[in-house]
Image: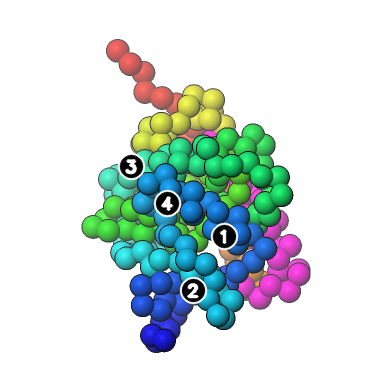
Amino acid sequence: MAEEEVLAGGGVNHVVRIGGTVRRPVGPWTPAVHALLEHLAARGFTGAPRCHGVDGAGREILDFVPGEVPGHPLPEWARTDGALVAAGGLLREFHDATLDFPKNPDMEWYFPPRSPAEVVCHGDVATYNCVFREGRPVAFIDFDTAHPGPRIWDVSYAAYRFVPLGDPRHADGVPVAEQARRVRLFADAYGLGEQDRGALVETARERLAHLVRHMHERAAAGDEAFAGHIARGDDTLYRADLDHLARHRATLTPVPRQRG
């Protein structure tokens, strides 16, 4: 057996690399995630790892996707307009590849399906779950939180992370006017419809509120990783971003460009 290399991540799972594979803990949702990854492979979507079952230690086996996963502070190559546009296009490709994923009410997901279940959402599309090559996103990783839901549930959170749409006073923050410009770029790259554009900011707020509740629920259940996130103030940061999005809702709504 090749030597195990511990991979850095969000601090929730212990993830290791062995040769050309990644080994991760499994959960009740793993069969659904593997079915999704197999479906994506069959549809020719290359922006996700392939799965190879479970090893003798009870860990799932996934392809190691070569490239760079940016940390914080974000490097400049992860903050360019080109990277943002590529991320929006990759997310659209992923969602479209799931349109014919079989609907099975018996499948267990990490988060319950949300209505309308237009696509299968990744559930945590962010720079820290994206592999870059030569400054461009090429694949999403960590599909544990995938679940059926509306496109905008994924798009709004991806915009929050990639634009980013947080309070400009945070590290990696950008001015509100620049956020407004970049969120339009992201929505255009995805091809977001008019109704979803109007819902993006409020959905991002709903998504952040959901995240804060989940963090506290997991911490209360004894999850040390989430307790650590709260101890370092992540929930306070997200609440500040909720207020920021409410203050600038109109400015940050990505209305389509007028033609003519």
- Identify the magenta region: 200-225
Q: Quadrant of residue 109?
A: bottom right
Q: Earlier in the sequence, mark 2 or mark 1?
A: 2
Residue drawn at the location 42% of the way across and 59% of the way down: 49
Residue drawn at the location 33% of the way across and 53% of the way down: 138
Mark seen at residue 144: 1
Kind of residue at disc 3: Val
Query: Would you name the residue on which mark 4 appears?
Result: 41
Secondary element at tag 4: helix
Q: Earlier in the sequence, mark 1 or mark 3?
A: 3
Secondary element at tag 1: loop
- Asked whether disc 4 touches disc 2, contact meaning CB atoms under 8 Å apart, the reply is no
- Asked whether disc 2 touches disc 1, contact meaning CB atoms under 8 Å apart, the reply is no
Specify the quadrant that holds the C terminus.
Answer: top left
Q: Earlier in the sequence, mark 4 or mark 3?
A: 4
Q: Earlier in the sequence, mark 2 or mark 3?
A: 2
